[in-house]
Amino acid sequence: MPGHQMAPDIRQETSTDPDDPVGVLAAEQAHLAESRAALTAMRAHAQSLSADAAGDWVSQQILQSLLDQRVAALADHPDTPLFFGRLDRAGGDDLPSTIYVGRRHVHDAGSKPLVIDWRAPVSRAFYQASPADPMGVERRRRFGYHGGALTAYEDEPLADGGDIGPSKILTEEIERPRTGPMRDIVATIQPDQDEIVRSTLAQTVCVQGAPGTGKTAVGLHRAAYLLFTHRERLARSGVMIVGPNRAFLSYISSVLPALGEVKVDQTTVAGLLGEHAAPEDPEVAAIKGDARMAAVLERALWLHIVKPEEGVVFTKGAYRHRVADYEVREIVASLRGTTRYNPGRAALAQRLAHMVLVRMEQRGESPDDRVQDAVARSKPVKQLVDAVWPKLTPEQVLHRLLSDPEFRAKAAKSDLTAEEQELLAWRKPYRSWKSAKWSAADAALLDELRDLMERTPSLGHLVVDEAQDLSEMQLRALGRRCRNGSATVLGDLAQGTTPWSTTSWQAVLEHLGQREGEVTELTLGFRVPREVLDYAARLLPSIAPGLAAPRSLRPGAGSLTVLPGGSVIEVARQALAKEGSIGVIVPDALVETVSQALAELPHAVLDPDSPDEQRLLVVPATLAKGLEYDHVIVVEPADIVAAEPRGLARLYVVLTRAVTSLTVLHDKPLPAELAA
Ligand SMILES: Nc1ncnc2c1ncn2[C@@H]1O[C@H](COP(=O)(O)OP(=O)(O)OP(=O)(O)O)[C@@H](O)[C@H]1O
């Protein structure tokens, strides 16, 4: 019906709709009860399976762990809706005409599907079907829950081409007060988000998105989607989520388990590359993070190979078998550049041993392969290998590079200017590589060296969040871990706060080794009220001039308050009287002072290692990235800006954490860019 408007309505139990909504709701509640009972039966069945049938002890252990995982994945969380949608389909294929879409498959004793996993191909229509393209769906039904109880439903007729208007259930979900860790968005994934979630495993996707557009949520759901769709392959190769810090990991930690995915590693770059954190001048860190260091490190490593001046003499009985110096030089030359460093060492020993065996044969002996191994391990061969192709650790090589100017010049060649080479030098050199204290930037250099020595195994898929903050060398390190797989790269060019923050996603993909990756954008904000987002966006021309101003789905009139000379305890007290979480985001140097100022109120300082039990948290500005709170109180923006070189970008991050209200408290004048 052209022009016909049909807004979906939420029908409550009390409704007197002629279609009998009370009866519909009762029937849907019955389907929920039946599905719950079936899930319990599936779990009981999984629990009854025994690993004893496996032949040996190792197989038994593996089978038992698989069974345990299956049982864990089948747990019913009474507060989490088992299904959230229903599709009534036109039919014409061999799939059921009514499908319930939920977090996992549930079937009854006769294998009839009661709930279909949201990741199954047939569920795609739940997220993508529209009156313009109904995808075979006549009616989409969304369910509203209160606690674990099904209390409402909302119908969207798709077959007659009319406009269906906004979903009230989606609006309620976005408006709900935030408490505790991040939740999944499986019931309300939007069509453009769904496109990213369901992109194929082979495809690397890079998502630019303003604060609160759902990048993190989309990355986590894509991981869950890929695990479901390529279960066996990814169980072997693995999926990993890399986030900016431990506070963020703790915030997102329950999303994947809630979707039944319990075997995904979630870590930080430091967790992956080594928790090195020696302080470092940002200027030095920037050089160390530059991809030009890759060539410097490669040269630094291979400079350790010494031109062979002597051959090998292997004595057996009365005979002395010789490999001449020029032959050793030929072997070394042929191995250089064709192998990684450590396998090269082993190959050199084997090639020398092979030459010795050839000499033995020339003398009429008939040595077998075991003799070759013994010769390769013999003292004269080992001595030569150690002299020519020495055993090294990444730390030894980097220690030499950062402390020996002549060696550094040889390794750097023209890749680094004389000034950059000078900057790389440790101000106070460490006596040995064993006592050296490494910085976060060094961790990526050590990882690069490790890979030059021994190949780093690749995972099947990597999700990298806040990727704008990674250095080129860190991206290379992550790229190694997905070189035989793919990646989901998430970030916002405006939220870059490190000395090496990127200004181009193409460059990020390049350094990640995923040049073919597709850059896409999410533009609609689900977190920050419009008024607050517009306020924060005043900073954009200074921090990311190329980016369009972000848009918010949520008007949030009256959500912004700027209070010169306001009292933090007063504002915090007012926030405590309302619903939801409260983050008092402060310059790192003021954490103690503000915590003392709040002494009368129950509160805690954000601790990445323990879950937040308090509703009121003091959050250091540098840990706020990726987090959100219902009510955000930002203390002294000028100090947040002054604390670091990219302080304005930090302030942008901090101002965009609010779901319901933002209060800015300042004694000092506001930064000019914000006051404008
Ligand atoms: N489709 C959706 N339905 C309901 N809520 C959503 C949806 N998409 C995102 N959200 C919610 O919006 C908030 C912001 O999402 P998320 O943290 O993923 O954004 P982000 O783009 O990573 O933000 P930032 O750049 O600030 O870290 C979260 O509370 C998330 O659950």
Image (tube, helix red, strand yellow):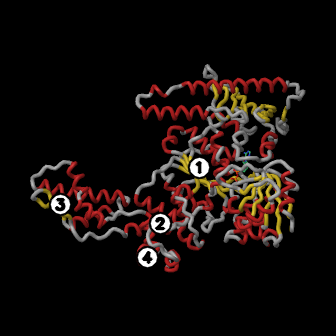
Which of the two discs, 2 and 4, labels the residue nearer the N terminus?
2
Q: Nearer the viewer, mark 2 or mark 4?
A: 4
Q: Nearer the viewer, residue 464 or 509?
A: 464
Residue named by callout 4: 404
Sequence-wise first label, 3 or 2:
2
Q: Is residue 379 above or below residue 499?
A: above
- Judging by the rendered image, the residue that carries numbered circle 1 is 266
For residue 578, which numbered disc appears in the image?
none
Q: Which residue is denoted by mark 3 in the rendering?
A: 314
Where's residue 654, x and y in %? 74, 61
Q: Amino acid at mark 3?
A: Phe
Horizontal side, residue 98 vs residue 201: left or right: right
The foreground one among 448 and 193 is: 448
Q: CA distance from mark 3 to mark 4?
A: 37 Å
Disc 3 on helix, strand or loop? strand
Q: Amino acid at mark 1?
A: Gln
Q: Quadrant of residue 136?
A: top right
Q: Secondary structure at mark 1?
A: strand
Please state which amino acid type lies under the numbered disc 4. Asp
Label 4: how many Cα within 10 Å (few below 14, some 14–19, many 20+): some
Circle 2 SS class:
helix
The residue labelled by disc 2 is: 294
Q: Is residue 620 left or right of residue 74?
A: right
